[in-house]
Image (cartoon, rainbow, N blue to C red):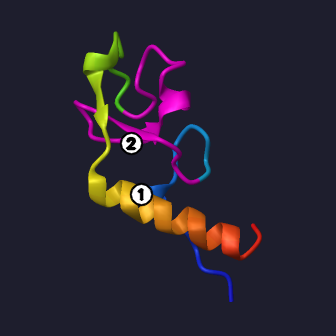
Amino acid sequence: MKKKISRSLICPIFLDPLIDPQTHILCENSFCNRCIRRLRHCPCCRTSIIGTDDLKQTSHVLRNILDELQISLIMKGL
């Protein structure tokens, strides 16, 4: 039985589990650091992303969940 990964753990740009996630300070959506740094506007709320002040490191809890997910995927050979 294949389990579905929660949408909150998926990068809306990359469409895979978040890697090194950053959160937009206005809309609180999270993205892969590499994905969001390439854009000038948030793909969810369309506000400008001028610099690093517009992003913050995603919560420690979410980062831990993502780490556990990555370990689980590696152990399953995915």
* 8 sits to left or right of 10: left
Q: Is residue 60 above or below residue 20?
A: below
* 42 sits to left or right of 32: left
Image quadrant occupied by the C terminus: bottom right
The residue segment tinted magenta is 17-44
User: Under tag 2, what secondary structure?
Assistant: strand
Count of labels shown? 2
**Residue drawn at the location 34% of the way across and 30% of the way down:** 45
User: Under tag 1, what secondary structure?
Assistant: helix
Image quadrant assignment for residue 38 = top right
Which numbered disc covers residue 16? Answer: none
Residue that badge 1 annotates: 8
Mark with earlier residue (2, 1):
1
**Neighbourhood count class around disc 2 (C-alpha, 10 Å): few under 14, some 14–19, many 20 upward:** many
Magenta-colored stretch includes residue 9: no
Residue type at mark 1? Ser
Residue that badge 2 annotates: 30
